[in-house]
Image: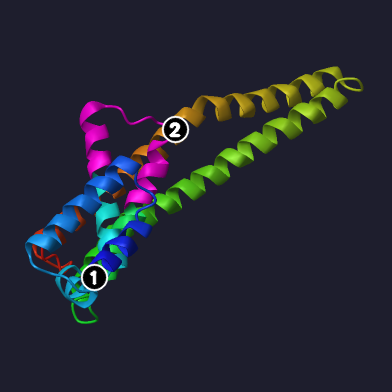
Amino acid sequence: MHEYIDELKSHLTELTAEEQLDVINFYTEYLADAGIETYAAAVDKLGTPVQLARKVLADYSIRASQTMDDTGAQTQSKQPQRDVRTIWLIILAILSFATPVGLIIPAILITICVVPFSIIFSIVVTIAAFFLGLLLMGVILIGAGGYIIFTSFWAGVLVLGIGFTALGLFLLLLPIFHWLTVNGIHLVSQLFQKLYNFLNEKNHFGKRV
């Protein structure tokens, strides 16, 4: 049993020391109460240490995300990173426990959740290309206008005006692009969390605790 717990702990480095201690104490007590003393028996009961660790990490990530949503503590700068991490941990947890036969339903549901992510990603890439084009056009035209104005004043002013307009549009629309990206990723993260909770309730993780 100690070998199992030690291996489990080695896969929980993403958690804080306090969180790791809580997890280790819980499963140590659980295995002791169940009278499980061997590594093989622990695997049969809880899955491999890697499988259990992935589920624990997904649970903690979801809990942290929900807590931040409830309290409003989620910062805009770190929210997309946390959401992407939560999505990844959920996928790992689902795939870790799923058998070839049992993978069918989770795979279908994951695909359904990935569709909006793909759509959002495509939109983000398209808008990002548009924004990059605006930025480059603005910089290039401002530079060109600054050169032309010495040979043809009004032509230079016109080119400069177009360049500053493009740059102004870029700066004006950038916060909107950021908002759409952050909230789009957060929406997909919430979909994955609902999927995870659904599969958890239906016992698709081999959860035995």
The percent coordinates of residue 72 (x first, y second) are 27, 27
Q: Magenta span: helix, strand or loop, mainly?
A: helix
Q: Quadrant of the N terminus?
A: bottom left
* Residue range highlighted in magenta: 63-86
Distance of mark 2 from mark 1, alpha carbons?
32 Å
- Between 91 and 35, which is closer to the camera in this rendering? 35
Residue type, label 2? Ser
Q: Is residue 59 left or right of residue 176?
A: left
Residue type, label 1? Phe
The percent coordinates of residue 102 (x first, y second) are 18, 77
Colour treatment of the image: rainbow
Q: Which residue in the structure is indicated by mark 2?
A: 77
Dot 2 and dot 1 residues touching (CB under 8 Å): no
Label number found at residue 170: none
Q: Is residue 77 left or right of residue 137?
A: left
Looking at the image, residue 165 lies above or below residue 52? above
For the point 7% across and 65% down, which residue is it?
A: 34
The percent coordinates of residue 8 (x first, y second) are 30, 61
Q: Residue furthest bottom?
A: 101
Q: Is residue 193 visible?
A: no
- Between 74 and 120, which is closer to the camera in this rendering? 74
Give the quadrant of residue 27: bottom left
For the point 37% across and 59% down, which residue is it?
A: 10
The percent coordinates of residue 125 (x first, y second) are 50, 49
Label 1, secondary structure: give it: helix
Looking at the image, residue 51 lies above or below residue 193? below
